[in-house]
Image (tube, rainbow, N blue to C red):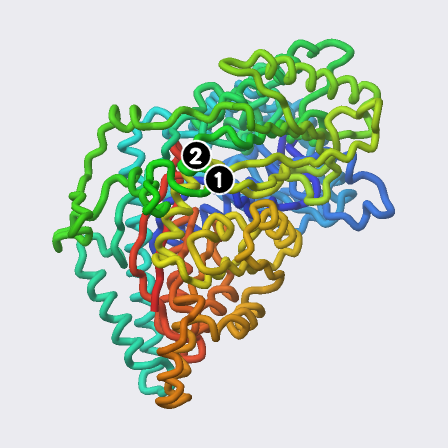
Amino acid sequence: MPETTPPLEEGGRRKRPREEREKDGDQEEIGGVGEKKKQQQRALRDERIENDAATVAAGDDDVKGGGEDAMRSGGTALIRGLPSAWDEREFRKRLDEMSATGHTSIKKRSGWTHAFVTFNFPREREECLRKLRESAKAQEEEGKSLAKGRKFGKKVTMHDARDKSGGNGSGNAKQGKKEKKAVTEARDAVCPLWNVKYSEQLKAKKEKVRKALAMVTELVGKANGKFKRNNYGKGGVTADGDAEETERWLKEANGRKSKRCCDLVGIVRSPVLEGYRNKSEFTIGNDSQGQPTIGFNVGLFREGNVAIGEPVGCRNISKVAICLQEAAQKYLRNVAGTEDALPCWDKRNGSGFWRLLIVREGGCAPSMFDDSGRSRNSNDNDSAAPAWRKWLRLEGECDEDGGDAKKTGDDKRSTNDNVDDDAENALSLEPPMPNGSSEVMVVVQINPGKEFDSAKMEKALKGIRDAMESAAAVFEPKPFSITVQLRQHNESVSNMAAADAHTSDLVVSDENNANNKPMVICERMCGLKFSLSHSAFFQVNTAAAELLYALAGEWASPNGKSLLLDVCCGTGTIGLTLASSVGKVVGLDIVEDAIRDAEKNSKLNEKVNCEWIAGKAEDTLDDVLKKYGEHVKTVAENTKEEGGNKEEERQQKREFLYDDVVAIVDPPRCGLHKRVLNALRAETRLRKIVYVSCNPESMAQNCVELCALRAKQFGPPFRPRSAAAVDLFPHTAHCEAVLVLER
């Protein structure tokens, strides 16, 4: 009997979750190139495979049977307890000896005690798993064991997984890779810098952005060198002036100790440090002791640890969210073991009823602006700019070349690398709290499987609703109401529900089953109102986002007369917040639903200088500039030579509606698509881009397409002019960056 594996975790259909636009994703480090970059790519690929297996760890109910099921994917199975000496070739050999067929791919490395196996169809997966179980059982009866400390057939408990978290390992240590370590407390997973002084957090985040700016210098320099080698002696590849300008700023950048491509003015700190998140998404499962728990995943799935940890000490979670989480958790634990109990979701076998608890808040955060959109600390002659300058820290650079942030005139702040933690804590605003105009949304995600009685489900949903409402009614310092209460059905393997997942009232009303109440709440930012559904993207730190957009608005249009192109605008958040700071906003997005939401928000705030267009950026940019180009001063200037002296005189006397054309982009963590980058660069009437990034590394990669020398048809290159870091996520390693590119 061939030696094989113990009982294993099974996967359902393979389905990768879509890119997360919530700006607090996985931690990332600024990477290099060459071998280091290849190692990072391999590590990310391995982690993605494991995450996929964790995500699709479903049970058998949705894949058994014939007919339509026979056309489904067999999914991916995570097989644990394998000898670490086996590599992929040896594992394939053992499967062949067992006549276990139907697998399309196998991943097993020497040093791993687990493997990932993907199958064609569910029936082939089931047959292979059956043979593996029979083999494991036979070897257990014979007393054989290949995995140290474990016999075949023994399940990995939470206690075992926690004890082994340091190491049976993946063999990555031998290859010099960083190995992801398990955490046992939710706060270590959700806000890993909870015990780090805020001054140290700011320094680290500013350094992260500085490294990204240095990465721009390095990557653009290498791209230019390759371009020159491949096009040496060829004509028509780029204008001589463009090449000279690019080489000039690269020389300046390389002359700095930090190698940054442009000025880094500092980092804008978050005005709120505690409980700043306006949206919290809690996972419902069992803790390490088997108790129903609402919180966050701890440990590593590959080590068998699927425990949920309570959000104790999570400094970024709001008090409102904690109040509702504790009430819902108390209800689940009170009914556990009774006939009213329903099981929590278990991703190991893809079964259970309770899956997620989502809490979204509107109008709770302190605002930097009044209802008219003006800074609360500015006088009648000020713009919104002083709001972000008040929170600017660690200004300037201390390079050997003398730095780049020498203050002159009225702005005489000196370079400062010290932040007083006591002073910063005293300056911080109070955590978000409910008030008379606040709105709160609760979404309970469930798996309404056929195995659950409908009457029992309705009773459970009413019970958890009543528990949360009771807690909200006695909340201190001031009770609040749950404005919107929803249930979301999700029978898929991932907690990431489909866009069209059934969503309705949490408890069916006896009086009106066809309740048409809106399933949205209202959030305020920069003096504007935004209508938010449970899935709509919105910055999680409202107070800090106001400073981010104030900074971006000042840099995009200093004189307030620009034509602003909000590229990939989504629901129009950033364009609407800047509408009062520019001449006109034209938002472009490929998603028609997002454009409709942007139009609704525009009407809600009575913004008449905004237009929203559905379509690809590469297809719509030219149409927009043809429509508005004659009203833009910089665009009209390009036609002077064609019209001669009379045309030049006419243009000089004319008053233009807009000074210039500026594009602002705020992409997800992966950055902008190459087609969008090409469209931005090829549009020669576009002189400035304000790039708002939640991932400085992908921003640096995008800058290669925008700033490096390329063939003439791609348009002249941009030059990095200035940058700033903005901390939207205190107590995590993430931050935003704002970069201005001009040509």
Q: Residue at x 61, y 14 (%)?
A: 473
Q: Residue at x 26, y 51 (%)?
A: 264
- Residue 321 lies in what quarter of the image? top right
Q: Is residue 633 visible?
A: yes
Label 1 vs 2, first from the N-terminus: 2
| Of residues 664 and 198, the one drawn nearer to the viewer in this rendering | 664
Percent from the top left, x then y, of residue 546? Answer: 42, 41
Q: Which residue is mark 2?
A: 367
Percent from the top left, x then y, of residue 433? Answer: 49, 23
| Of residues 160 and 663, the one drawn nearer to the viewer in this rendering | 663
Q: CA distance from mark 1 to mark 2?
A: 7 Å
Percent from the top left, x then y, of residue 402? Answer: 12, 53
Dot 2 crowding, Cα within 10 Å, few <14, some 14–19, many 20+: many
Question: Is 566 left, or right, of 463 in this rendering?
Answer: left
Q: Secondary structure at mark 2?
A: loop
User: What type is the residue that disc 2 sits on?
Assistant: Ser
Which image quadrant: the N terminus?
Answer: top right
Q: Which mark is residue 525?
A: 1
Dot 1 crowding, Cα within 10 Å, few <14, some 14–19, many 20+: many
Q: Residue at x 36, y 71 (%)?
A: 717
Tag 1–tag 2 contact (CB < 8 Å): yes
Q: Which mark is residue 548?
A: none
User: What type is the residue that disc 1 sits on?
Assistant: Met
